[in-house]
Image (cartoon, helix red, strand yellow):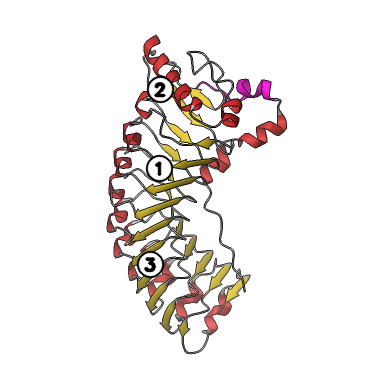
Amino acid sequence: MAHEYPSPYSLLSRVIITPCFFIFLLFPLSSISSFHVIVTSASTPTVALSKVEQDQEALALLTWKVNLDNQTQFFLSSWSGRNSCNHWFGVACHRSGSVSDLNLQSCGLRGTLQNLNFSSLPNLLTLNLSGNSLQGTIPINIGNISKLLTVLDFGSNHFIGVIPEQLRFLTSLSFLSLASNNFRGSILPFIGNLRNLTILYLSDNELFGSIPQEIGLLRSLNHLKLDINNPTGSIHPSIGNLRNLTTLYLHTNKLSSFIPQEIGLLKSLNDLQLGINNLTGPIPSSICNLRNLTTLILHTNNLTGLIPHCIGNLRNLTTLYLHMNKLSGLIPQEIGLLISLNDLGI
């Protein structure tokens, strides 16, 4: 049976940010800029920017534009003049006149970030460049971007190299997606600095090494996706600190050792996917504490022992995959209590 996992695309961007291609279907090019530009009522900053500061923001964006490919430059034809808040496509501004948001999701952008001067965007709140064809590495001067930044979405591009440790300085981030790229290296050893994260998507890269135990410091985290990478080692017991998690994807990796009993502390979980790893030992009985689970995927591991009889506690399950393991004994009759179940693999 073939099993298809959900896409790691940005939940936030799919809900609140209008894709560029959709705008093209609704409006002619001449009307795009006036449709997409907004002026935010954000309270920061409250002091109006000087002309010099506005010029610096505009220059930073224009310099980046002219170093992108010709088709992208044409698409950003509204970017002209010295005022980036004057009907520039994809740009939103504070009332002070400073750039607050740069949203260019799914706009077919081609090029790199090397010529984007992040330090010239000191009041940026949102940077969404997901779903494009941007390539190269993330420059280390990303750490000089606005310390107010709450959303950083570089997902679904062609970025390569190591994720720069300078991201550790972006301590206001609540949303970070680097999913579906070609990043290599260890899994964010600085992750414990980003204590305000509620969403972290790193799926579908080439990250390796152990999952840092500091991930247990992210107590506000709701969604954690580290699937389709190459991490090894065990799932650290600190995962049990993430009491607000609703989604945990660690599937399609090279994780080994036991599933920690602390997994049973994540009582807000709806979706737990640990399939296609090298996990060993029994299914921990603490997993039966996760009464909000709708999806439990543990297939294609080396799990042994009995299926816990308490599995019948998980009355909200709609999907349960336990196949391709080394489980023994009878299928517990309590599985008949899972009246919402519509997809079962044992």
Q: What are the residue bounds of the magenta stretch?
A: 29-41
Measured in 3D between alpha carbons, the distance from the residue under mark 3 to the one under mark 1, in whole angstroms, is: 38 Å
Q: Quadrant of the N terminus?
A: bottom right
Nearest the eye: 253 or 275: 253
How packed mark 3 is, by other alpha carbons closer than 10 Å (few <14, some 14-19, many 20 or more), is some
Q: Position of residue 179 (x, y in %)?
A: 47, 50
Left or right: 279, with 32 as reference point: left
Instruction: Pick the residue in front: 182 or 214.
Output: 182
Tell me the quarter of the picture where residue 259 sits: bottom left
Residue 222 in the image: x percent, y percent? 43, 51
**Magenta segment: does it hold 332?**
no
* Sequence-earlier tag: 3 or 1: 1
Secondary structure mostly seen in magenta is helix
Spatial separation of the CA atoms under disc 2 and disc 3: 41 Å
What SS does tag 2 mark? loop
Residue 105's quadrant in the figure? Answer: top right
First in sequence, mark 2 or 3: give its number.
2
Q: Which residue is mark 2?
A: 43
As shown in the figure, which amino acid type bears the numbered disc 2?
Answer: Ser
Q: Nearer the viewer, mark 2 or mark 1?
A: 1
Give me the disc on residue 137.
1
Q: Nearer the viewer, mark 3 or mark 1?
A: 1
- Marker disc for residue 264: 3
The answer to whether residue 211 is left or right of residue 84 is left
Q: Is residue 245 visible?
A: yes
Element under disc 3: helix
- Please state which amino acid type lies under the numbered disc 3: Gly
